[in-house]
Amino acid sequence: MFKNLKISLILTTLTIIMFGLGYPFFFIAAGLLIPEKSTGSPVYAEGRIAGFENIGQNFTDDKYFNGRPSAVNYDASATGGSNKGPSNPEYLTEVQARIDTFLIHNPDISKSDIPSDLITASGSGIDPDITPDAAYIQVKRISKNRSVSEEELRQIIKKNTDGKYLGIFGEERINLLKLNIELDKIH
Amino acid sequence: MILGFILLALPALHFEMQGNPEIDKMGISQTQGNMEGKEIRFGAASSAIWGVETTCTSNGSVNSMHDSFMPISGMMLMLGMQLNAFFGGVGVGFINMFVFIILAIFISGLMAGRTPELFGKKIEGFEIRTALLVGIIHPILILGGTALAAYIWTETPDPNQTLKWLNNPSYHGFSEMFYEFTSAAANNGSGFEGLGDNTSFWNFGTGISMLLGRFIPIIGPIAIAGSLAIKKFTPESAGSLKTDSVIFGIVLFMTILILGALLFFPGLVSGPVAEYFSMN
């Protein structure tokens, strides 16, 4: 009995030291070796931090590529999805409203061309990416608002498209923040 | 186990990639699949696969919002946790398979008229009773808990104002409650997170089913193993049942389907299946 207690006490203390102190300090040390990655992959523009690679920001201006809708308004301290079920009438009205808004801002496109990622909210609410389809469909509007040729816009979209992870997992995507920074550089 | 996993993953994949027919009706192409609650870098297909993986293995981490999954794929996630024997996770995964193996041995022993044996040890009354208890506690916790929650919800006047649990109406709301108790009893941790579950009812209710759902399936099989260990080894004879044959594999799979899944079908029918048919 006493022996058992002693063994379990020693084991508890050892694991607290190993995993309570050793493990976090190991990762702090590892983080110091690769500062770019451990500070959240900041993205720089015009010499200052414009944002972070993996935290989406809300672009609603017609001059920029717009991102996906967000259930939490791109609040990175309160991430989450809408959690609305696919048959929820309230949710379907919301989607319809998003479609209508998008058509008002982009009058030149037809409804069936809208990619579904632009009218559905992401799970985290801060999805940093959009699909290539979602970017190409906004080309006309941006070219009008900025007097940049459509060809030029298509080129920077193509340049910023990232492939699937390891070639098979996930989808092709574009980091919205990087794309918009690139867009500002054209002028 | 792999067969069961694939059977769960394929429908989930199919329905997530097909997208939401209600949005399709609005004239939006659904080639990307159902993107609500999903990140672009994962996409619909990978999210569906991970959803099935995380629920089959009592892992519980999510990369997309399960609440916004299509009804049938949501059902596959629930089935993964309700069977809790395809892979399973730390602690209870293989144990549940072990329980099903003992039950399958007993059933096929009865059917073929052989002595039920596992690794040369006779399976007798005590083992069967314990295995059945373990097999039955999981559905009792899930179905009982969900029934209680649904009862409270329907008995409360104006529940949307007073209880405010449900984020979605009708069938999907029932699925939310069903999923929550399933996830608790299977020690999974994921959820249909639209459910406002930080109330004393949900915290206590799911807490109790977590405790029972975790420890009874551990204590039971340990008791079986202990009782098998002290039994004398009986050498294999013409009358003993072979447990390494294809036939036994089929019997085992059917046992899991019949004992494990059929118990949950009434619940699944009134949640996801009803929602599926209401959408088409």
Image (cartoon, rainbow, N blue to C red):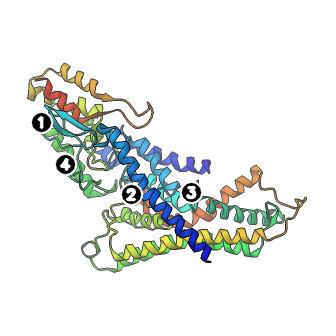
Q: Residue at x 66, y 69 (%)?
A: B222
Q: Chain of mark 3?
A: B
Asked if residue B27 shows in the view, the reply is: no
Indicate the position of residue B174 as horizontal and vertical percent values. Answer: 39, 66
Say which of marks 3 and 1 sits in front. Answer: 3
Which numbered disc covers residue B88? Answer: 3
Find disc 2 in the rendering and name its residue: B278
Q: Residue furthest right?
A: B238
Q: Do the residues under discs 3 and 2 have CB atoms within 8 angstroms?
A: no
Q: CA separation, marks 2 and 4?
A: 23 Å
Q: Amino acid at mark 4?
A: Ala
Any part of residue A48 in sight: yes
Under mark 3, the amino acid is Gly
Q: CA distance from mark 3 to mark 2?
A: 32 Å
Give the left or right position of residue A20, taking residue B263 as reference: left
The residue lying at 39 percent from left, 57 percent from top is: B278
Q: Quadrant of residue A60?
A: top left
> Disc 1 marks which residue?
A62
Seen from the viewer's position, the closer of residues B133 and B159 is B133
